[in-house]
Image (spheres, rainbow, N blue to C red):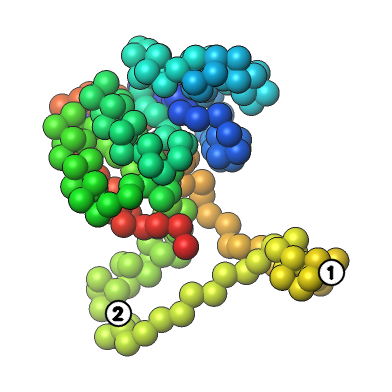
Amino acid sequence: RGARVSTRPLGLALLGCGHAARLAAGGLKPLGNAVRCLYASRDAERARAFAGELRGAGSFGSYDEALKSPEVDAVLVLLPPDQHLDWTLRALSAGKHVVVEKPPFLRAADFDTVEAAARAAGRRVLVAENYFYKPLLVTLRRLLREKAIGEVLGGAHRIGLSPSVIALLHGFRRLKPSKPLSMATAPSPIGIMFSGIQSMSARGSSTRSRFSRARFSFDS
């Protein structure tokens, strides 16, 4: 028999109410009612304000309160990088899945610590790294594994820039490009990751945890 997938919305607590939380909320919109976003801050009023602004399902006046809540299945760590390790480990100890914003941790050894904690807790830890999940790169990794293009001797990476960034680089001159100069689009990494976590939550904590293969993917 296949595993049953729960129809209950995934309870997601966003730890940290700043600009990153607004971006994450936008990335989660395509999931609709499949995810219930709850906002946590050290300032209860700020958390309530974010929940109201972003149409969240609730708020918490501390990060610990969010981790203790039975409404929360997973957390998104949106705190300063030097706090990522501590709150990732706390969340795992509380039985929550974790998505940690990039850059994830400060030391290479931290990844091993988190991986061990995730396996012990039977929970997933994933890094919110956009490019790892792009369909183009999924295909490229497959072709490289299959050695379809032979030995790779080198590579290049080209990224388009938005008109506003180009204007900044050209001395704040207003530019009107003939066609959009934006970065290639891809499915929201948060949406992809939480779809996987939702399925895992439905199967129960006995499922073997998997640590993201993108654990060494830092924002460049």
Instruction: State the mark number for residue 146.
Output: none
Crowd band around label 1 with a 10 angstrom C-alpha radius: few (<14), some (14–19), many (20+): few
Is 218 above or below relative to 65?
below
Q: Label 1 is placed on what type of residue?
A: Arg
Name the one closer to the observer, 79 or 137: 79
> Residue at label 2?
148
Q: Nearer the viewer, residue 166 or 37?
A: 166
Q: Which residue is mark 1?
A: 173
Residue 8 at least partly seen? no
Give the image quarter of residue 152.
bottom left
Determine the residue positioned at 60% across, 14% down. Answer: 45
Can residue 39 be seen from the camera position used here? yes
Q: Quadrant of residue 210?
A: top left
Tell me which residue sits at (61%, 62%) in the image.
Answer: 183
Report the amino acid beneath label 2. Answer: Ala
At 46% from the left and 36% from the top, the residue drawn is 79
Q: Position of residue 51 (x, y in %)?
A: 60, 20
